[in-house]
Image (cartoon, rainbow, N blue to C red):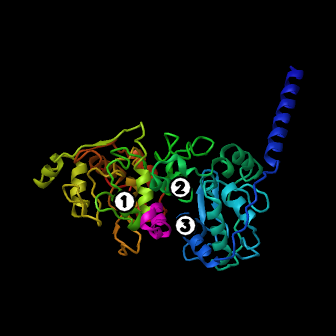
Amino acid sequence: MKKFLLSLIALAVLVFVALLAFALWPTSTPALTAASDADQAALIEKGRYLADAGDCTACHTTEGGKPFAGGLPIASPIGKLYSSNITPDKASGIGSYSLDDFDRAVRHGIAANGNSLYPAMPYPAYARTSDDDMRALYAYFMHGVAPVYAENRANDVPWPLSMRWPLAIWRKVFAPAPQAVGFDASRYKDPQVARGAYLVQGLGHCGTCHTPRALTLQEKALDESGAEYLSGGPVIDGWLAVNLRSNPADGLGGWSVDDIVATLRSARSPTHAVLGGPMGDVVTHSTQHLTDADLQAVAVYLKTLPASERQVSSFKADPTTAKALAAGQEGSRGAELYVDNCSACHRTNGQGYERVFPKIAGNSSVLSEDPVSMIRLVLAGSKLPATAAAPSQLGMPGFAWRMSDEEVAQLLTFIRSSWGNQAPAVKLEQVAQMRATLPKESPAVSRTDIAKP
């Protein structure tokens, strides 16, 4: 037995040494040739556009802070991360980065000091960015961004998860090397679809949020070759990253190309939804700045994705609910709550008002398998972002101050099973769990003791 235990210990030591060696072995990356200085202004402007497409502002700029100076807290499964200063300040930013240093960080996930970056930086997606676009991005961040002195804040990640060398193993196993994946436009017969795929898979890094992840936290697919690509991701800040495939109920199956373009341009769709939460920030900082041609390409590409196999909800228009509510027939507590709190904006027929109050009948967010976004919306409310195409910041108030957990569950269950909607019921426990995540000082957490009807 003693020899057996010693053998196990020796094997464990060998495995640990092998893993450590694998992690610490330097990663060689091909050098990029510098761009010509012939038209530096045009290159910088191209880089600015690409930075918008990559939504760099959203993570690297704090509210009210200097552009790209970092410091934004980012929640992750292992702790709170803080984005870094990516201005060209030489002391605290990336002003001393060479083009290769910049490329290694953005596309390979390797900092200038050799440390592996946490995949909160979406380098597995950025790996598909072309060499030419990397040169433009570098020109912009070196010469088109104002340098800001702002020391990077240490991440709030407990030991041993704070050790960097295991990240190198994750990077080498799960993150594709740019020279291995690149982006092959010839895979797509239509150049417009190819352009959309390049933006969605690469700089847009849509899969970072909208693709489910494995237990080891890598995305289960990085493009449409995987059936789970863009089929819906995790909950982020209380909002579900929705299914972007062609599922008819909880996906984009019922959306037209124009619906998608309008939503990415203004955070409002004439017929489907309005955007708040993290996706509202994406529209504000990124997609509203893209050209019409690129937004069309993104939408056309998304419409090529077939529906995912898992479909737990459905919609078939049914006038029964609208007729009953119009006649004053409220057959459940959920119906009563809807008439009292929701019908003024969303109407008794569930159709809302175009570009202002979204329709509920057939709404893909309403029909999501996980109702977490709808629960958060009812409890805490939301506000539309102001965009150039739609500057009014319309909002929905939170109702947690006046509804108990049971009432919120009853209301949402009614909404998810009326006008032809068919989606799983909302449970009281789901509402209580969401309410517990809201700020303690918020009135949204003060009504759990309402007497139940």
Q: How far apart are labels 3 and 1 at the CA level?
A: 29 Å
* 1 and 2 marks in contact (CB < 8 Å): no
Residue drawn at (24%, 60%), measured in percent from left and top?
352
* Residue 243 highlighted magenta (yes or no): no
**Is tag 1's residue or tag 2's residue first in the polypeptide sequence?**
2
Residue pointed to by mark 2: 198
Query: At label 2, which amino acid type do we have?
Result: Tyr
Number of the label disc, if any, that sits on residue 400: 1
Residue identifier under label 3: 58
Q: Mark 3, residues whose alpha carbon is within 10 Å: few (<14), some, or many (≥20)?
A: many
Looking at this view, name the residue that lies furthest to the left. 327
> At which x and y percent is residue 340?
22, 59
Q: Say whether disc 2 or disc 3 marks the residue closer to the N-terminus.
A: 3
Q: Nearer the viewer, mark 3 or mark 1?
A: 3
Residue at image coords 56%, 67%: 50
Q: Which residues are magenta?
A: 277-294
